[in-house]
Image: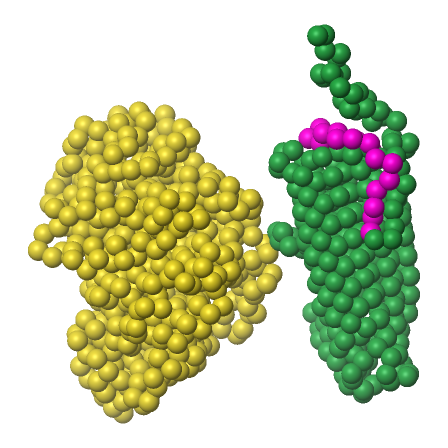
Amino acid sequence: MTELLIQNGSVYDPINRINGEKMDIAVKDGKIVASVSETRAKKINALGMIVMPGGVDIHTHIAGSEVNTGRLIRPEDHYRDFERKTTMTRSGVGHSVPSTFTTGYRYARMGYTTVMNPSMAPLEAKHTHEELNDIPIVDKATYPLVGDWWFVLEYLKRPNIKELARHVAWMMTSTKGYALKIVNPGGLEAWGSGSNMHSLEDQIPYFCVTPREIIRGLCKVNKLLNLPHTIHVHTNNLGTPGNYVTALETMRSVEDLAENDNHAIHITHCQFSAFKGDDWRTLESGAEEVANYVNCHSHVTLDMGQIVFTSTTTMTADGPFQYNLYRLTGNKWVNQDVETETSTGIVPFRYRRRNYVHATQWSIGLELALLIKDPWKIFLTTDHPNAGPFTSYPRIIGWLMSKKAREATMKRMNPRARSRSLLSSIARELGIYEIAIMTRAGQAKALGLKDKGHLAVGADADIAIYSIDASRTDPSRDYKTVRKALKRAAYTIKNGEIVSKDGEITRNVKGATLWTNIKTSEPCEIDEDMKARFRDYWTVECENYPVAEHYLEISKPITVKAEV
Amino acid sequence: MIQLRPKKMFTLPITSELINPDVLTSKTLGEIEKTKLWEGNKQKTLGELFRIDKTNEAEPMLSVVGDMSKVRRIGAYMKAGDLVIHGNVGTHLGEEMKGGKITVHGNTEGWAGSMMAGGSIEIHGNASDYLAAPYRGSAKGMRGGTIVVHGNVGNEAGAHMTRGIIKVYGNVGQFAGFRMRDGTIYIEGNCMSRAGACMVGGKIIVAGFLESMLPTFTIDNIRPKVKIEEDQSAMGPFYVFLGDLVEQGDGKLYVSKDRNPQLSIFEKFLQGDMFYGQKVER
């Protein structure tokens, strides 16, 4: 097996509190080890470069039925952005919804090695895993949507949390999911009958359960099952002015369920949930209020969902929100009801600098990241491709690290949004250490990935090396150099093998699919009643529903012992 | 002036944005011969495929003589100059052009003047489908300039158009002005069905026979004549229809009264006190 020795790099490993120290990293058999033989190992001279754990992306739509439909309805997204075949890589197309192989290559080029696909209708699990199998190099996982699944609503109606936990465990293991995703709790089921949830107290038609009960119920389930990640929540009222109140209410609703500083909830693409104002004209940033709350509480983690001014494709499981987007834009669109489970919607969208709302949204994302003091609580995402493609991460890092970069963009954006933005009053500029937290360490920790996001002995040898000379470069001034270096990592190492060098893929390896294998004391009983329900309400029989483990090309289960 | 003549009958598609006065006039004859382009999946030089003559250095004019129906994207992204083609032309002629003039003495394939923003194209033969329409999936239509076609035109002419003028002196296929937002389409000949489907603005003038009228248009009035551009008007009388109501559109569809006697049924909606063609008793 290959041995690697990375010499003289400035290492940033926040989990082990290593901040820019010059040290060597030794790799053997895909793991980080204390030392390797100097003669046998292949040496990488990382002098004048920074060495970080491989990037982790907590929320990026890269596979599944909605991504595929997004590809289908956007030919114009493909012929403007294509990659030629090389001896090592396949050809591919797509700017905001790239094809599977291209997705893997592009992540690897940026030094990312673990990515999480955050929404999978359980019914589409097989399709999603087939696509994940086709994404090379990076490790990946997917979160099944459980918030509006009929069984969940019925158990909550009774209420029977322990039975629910057992059922969720069966469902997670059957679909090979990683964490519990809740999208617009209750709203998707209500959308089936043409309504939506506007507060945590609204009742879902027929089931008579409120969004608050769904969030709290699943948060308890998450704890009973000892899942590595918390519940992953896309709030109600997403993308509606004045919705920061709902976001705060959602975070508050599980405050009492957090024990000893453990996280209890992850609010995803928080930028879309931090709007203040009564309508689009009076839209303002609610980032300050959200940041104040998060600064005082330790049970929440967030990710940014940062806007980038470009043409992109919005796709969420939030049917009603997507319908409103269609009404707003008049673009072509897709809206779908996934049987008894969830809904989905896709609308192509263009974020414009000159548009007041879009410019304000841009500002909200950055305000959140800069006003929240602890970088372990907020992570960098664009909710790819909803707010922008993941390939724009280097650009966002530029904005976070440099006030000059922010001002350069603000100069060209809508003047009213500029004058109302808090950004001009925020002087904070993040350092490389903080960026390392927001892009890998923090995300790995929040996801409960023990072997990823750090470089201690025993960790997976997923390493990114960027040619930034930490001692000489001042990211606040030379943000363009930093951006360029981050765009094309000098080396990306996956499982101890160099997969990308200077932005060129050098080795085509396969990434593993992570999933949680939940061991409950007594398994969920698949009784006749459940089978009958499947026969009545689903297009798939209960027996054909689970995804077998051999379906995953490289399966990497994380076994957890549940308390039920 | 530069003149290009094909050396053979092309059987494989040739893709070249370089056959464009902007690109070629500043080059010497040697450089022109060495410019690269694709024939099928092989890269060739212009000199291998065309006989090239260059005379009178200063004049920014490119003339192409011969059958170019396999050559795509001629004059794409053109900003200035004059391009004259004697022969048929392949798809994507003058795609996204911003200025200059293209004259074709022959027929063109699909997507002529696709997504153009300025300049003018004159086609003395027929134009195929998707005249001035965007390529698959895109909603970015013609944004300016003028297209004049002396022959017939295929389907979906001027789809997603936002500005500019298209004048057709022959007949037009289905879906003329599909989803157009603004601009003018003038059709002197006959027009097949579904003209103006999903239009939300702009105007379509049909001086000939209109095969069928979409039910989502409503009659507004009758006009003696309609302005096409500053110094040109079409003499009527014309029925004026508003639509497409499916999209809550505000587009105007002018249809010649004399050539379309079948539409006279609409006239009674213009007289007062009428409700679904029945005289309302008061």
In which quadrant of the rendered view does residue A557 lie?
A: bottom left
Inspect the magenta stretch and tell me whether residue B209 lies in it: yes
Inspect the magenta stretch and tell me whether residue A536 lies in it: no
Residue drawn at 13 percent across, 56 percent down: A262
Give the drawing colour for chain A.
Answer: yellow
Residue B143 visible from this viewpoint: yes
Q: Nearer the viewer, residue A481 or B53?
A: A481
Residue A100 visible from this viewpoint: no
Residue drawn at 62 percent across, 37 percent down: B247
Give the drawing colour for chain B.
Answer: green
x and y percentages locating residue A405 in the rendered image: 41, 74
In the image, the segment drawn in magenta is B208-229
Q: Residue at the bottom extreme?
A: A39
x and y percentages locating residue A380 in the rendered image: 33, 64
Q: Is residue A193 above or below residue B130?
A: above
> Would residue B20 appear left or right of A115 to someone viewing this image?
right
> Would residue B186 appear left or right of A150 to someone viewing this image?
right
In which quadrant of the rendered view does residue A483 lie?
A: bottom left
- Screen quadrant of the N terminus of chain B: bottom right
